[in-house]
Image (cartoon, coloured by chain):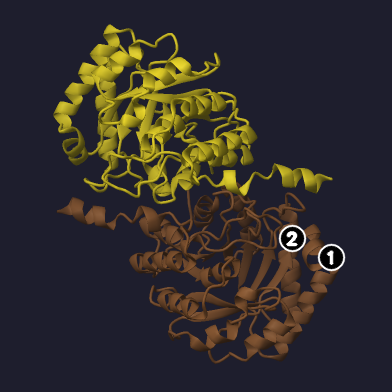
Chain colours: A yellow, B brown
Amino acid sequence: MSDFPKKVKINEEGPREGFQIEKTPIPTDKKIEFINALSETGLKHIQTISFVNPKRVPAWADADEVVKGQYYNPEIEYTPLWLNPKGFERALQYRDKLTLDGKIAIGASEKFLIRNQNTDFKRNLQMQEEYIALYKANGVPVKCVGVNSAFGCNFQGEIPTSRVLEAVGQAFTIAHKFGYDPQQIRLADTMAWATPDRIKHTVGAVRNKYPDKEIHLHLHDTRGMAIANAFAGLEMGVASYDSAVAGLGGCPFAGHAGAAGNICTEDLVFLCEEMGIETGIDLDKLIETAQLAEKIMGRSLPGSVMHGGTLSRFRKAAAQ
Amino acid sequence: MSDFPKKVKINEEGPREGFQIEKTPIPTDKKIEFINALSETGLKHIQTISFVNPKRVPAWADADEVVKGQYYNPEIEYTPLWLNPKGFERALQYRDKLTLDGKIAIGASEKFLIRNQNTDFKRNLQMQEEYIALYKANGVPVKCVGVNSAFGCNFQGEIPTSRVLEAVGQAFTIAHKFGYDPQQIRLADTMAWATPDRIKHTVGAVRNKYPDKEIHLHLHDTRGMAIANAFAGLEMGVASYDSAVAGLGGCPFAGHAGAAGNICTEDLVFLCEEMGIETGIDLDKLIETAQLAEKIMGRSLPGSVMHGGTLSRFRKAAAQ
C-alpha cells in the first residue's frame, strides 16, 4: 500500500524562520547558543541565517555576527537564505563557513508574484535566469528546483497540478540551459493550503513525470494539517523535508496574521522514528533544543512532542 | 489506494472533556451557553455531561443544573458519561433529555486496569457483565463495544494487535450473552501512543475480522499525531470519530501531566471537508464556538483552524 522511505533527510529551518518572526529582537548570543545546540542533535542540514535588508527585517541585522560567532560542526551543512542579489553577495563572503545552494524557485501563483514581488510569470522566469547566471558565474551549485505555493495560494486560490508540472518543467529548462542538472524537486505549501490527499495527488503527478528525482516537501502548519501532510508524503516515498524545531516560524509575506510556522521538527522526527523510518536525530536532544527555543523566545511554542513527551520513558518503565 | 468514506459522523466530546480538565471551575451558565452554541453547528452527537463523584471531580458538581438548563435541539443526541453504577443511576433520571448508550469498554492494558481501577482482566470482564446486566434491566441499548488503550499504554507499553482482537471478541461475547448485537467497534488511543501506520495496522486487522461492523476512533493529540491518525483512519474507511472543539480535554487518569486533549473537531472537519468528505457541520459556526470556548476558559486553546482560519475567504477573494 505504501512506499515508506527507509530514512528521511530533514532540513532544519528553525533559526532562520524563527528569529525573523519574533516581535522582540533575539539577542545575537542567544541566536548563536540556539544554533550551537541544534548542532548537537544529529541534524545534518540547518538553515541558520537570512541575508536580508536590515531595514526591512531588523531581526536579521546581526546576520554577520551570527555567522562569525557560531560553532561549525564539520558534519553539518549550514545554509543561508537570500532574497536578492545583494543578499547573495553577502552570503558569498562566507563560503568557508556556509553551504551555498542556488535553488530555482518558481511561483505557482501569478497573483502572489504580482502582489508580493511585482513580477508576473514571464518576469519571474527571467529573474530566475538572472539568478542562475549569477550562481554560475560564482561557481555555486544548483541542486534543486522548486515550486512555491504549489498546493494553493491565498490570492490565486487552488493551484492545478498542471501548473505545478509546468513550473517544474520551466525550472528544469532554465537549469539545463546553464548546464546544471538538479536532482531535487522542492514543493512548498507556502500558504498552508495542502491536505494529505492533495499532497498525494500532486506528489504522485510530479513523481510520475520525474521518477528519478528526489521530491522534497516544505509544509506549514497554519491549519494543523502539517503532520498529516508529512505522513501523506511518507506514504508517497518522499524522504526529504523542511521543518522547524518547536514549530518556529510563519510566513510574514502571505498577508495572513494567523499563519503558523513550519511543520515541527521533533513532531516529524517522532512520527518517523515511531514508524521505523530513520532520521539520524537524537529526539531527546532535539526536544531540549525546542525547550531552549521557548526560553529564548519567552513564550510557549506550538510543538506537541516537546510538551507531551516521547514514549521512551513509558517504554522503559513498562519493560521493568 | 484508499477507502475514503463519503461522510463521517462526529461525536463531540468538548463539553464533557473540556469542563472537567480546567483548573478554574467554569460557571454553570457558561457551560450551558457553550453547549447551546455547539447545538447550532450541525453536530448531531454531543457528549455534554459527566455524572461523576463531585468530591473527586468538583468541576462536574453542577451536572444536574447543566442537564436541566441547556437547550435541546431535537436533531441532536446528547449523551452523558458515567464511570460507575451510581453515575448511571443519575443519568437514568434524564432519559427524556439524554440519550443513554451502554458501551462495553474493555481495557487492552492490564497494568492500567490494575493501577487505575484496581481490577485485573478477569475482574474487568466481570464488571462489564455487571454493567450490561444493569443496562439490560433498564432497557438501555448497547450499540458499541470498545477497546481502551488500543494502541499503547503508559504502563503496559505496546499493545499487540492480537490483544485488541481478543478484547473486541470478549466484548462481543458479553454483549451476545445478553442478547445485544452492537454494530460499532470503538478503538481508543487513550494515552496517545498511536501513529498513523499503527492506526492502519490495527484498524485493518479489526476490519478484516469484523467487516460488517462500523469502526470508530477516539484519538488524543498529546504528541501531535491526532490529525495524521485521523487521516490514516479515513484512508481505512473509518467514518466515525470522537473529537473535541478547540482541542479541549486531556486525560487526568493517565499519570501524565502533559497529556493533550482529543483531536480538535474543527481541524478534523476542515480535513474532511477539504477532502470532499461530508461532515454536516458548519465550519464557520464551529470555529465561533471554539473561540467562545477560549473566552470561557480564559486561555488559548490548541485548535489550529480556529487560529489560522479556513480557506473560504481566500477562495472568495481569489474568485473575484
Residue type (three-letter) at the residue carrying disc 2:
Ala
Subunit that carries the residue with mark 2: B
Q: Quadrant of residue A177?
A: top left
Q: Which chain hosts label 1?
A: B
According to the image, label 1 marks what residue? Answer: B120
**Is A84 positioned to the left or the right of A30 in the image?**
left
Pair 2/1: label in front: 1
Residue pictured at 71% horizontal, 72% vertical = B172
Is B241 or A307 nearer to us in this picture?
A: A307
Q: CA distance from mark 2 to mark 1?
A: 11 Å
Q: Is residue B137 above or below residue A203?
A: below
Q: Is residue B185 left or right of residue A144?
A: right
Q: Which residue is mark 2?
A: B108
Residue type indicated by callout 1: Asp
Residue at image position (56%, 27%) is: A37
Q: Secondary structure at mark 1?
A: loop
Looking at the picture, tell me which residue is in the foreground, A285 or B28: B28
> Considering the image in quadrants, where does the C terminus of chain B appear?
bottom left
Residue B273 in view (yes/no): yes
Residue B221: percent from the left, percent from the top? 56, 54
Instruction: Give whichever of B140, B85 is nearer the camera.
Output: B85
Q: How would you rate the neighbour count of disc 1 (Cα within 10 Å): few for under 14, some for 14-19, many for 20 or more?
A: some
User: Does residue B179 show up?
Assistant: no
| Front residue of B64 and A300 | A300
Residue B98: x and y in percent read 55, 85
In the image, taking residue A201 as reference, residue B3 lies left or right, namely right
The quadrant where residue B54 appears? bottom right
Residue A63 drawn above or below residue B111: above
Q: Are marks 2 and 1 on the same chain?
A: yes
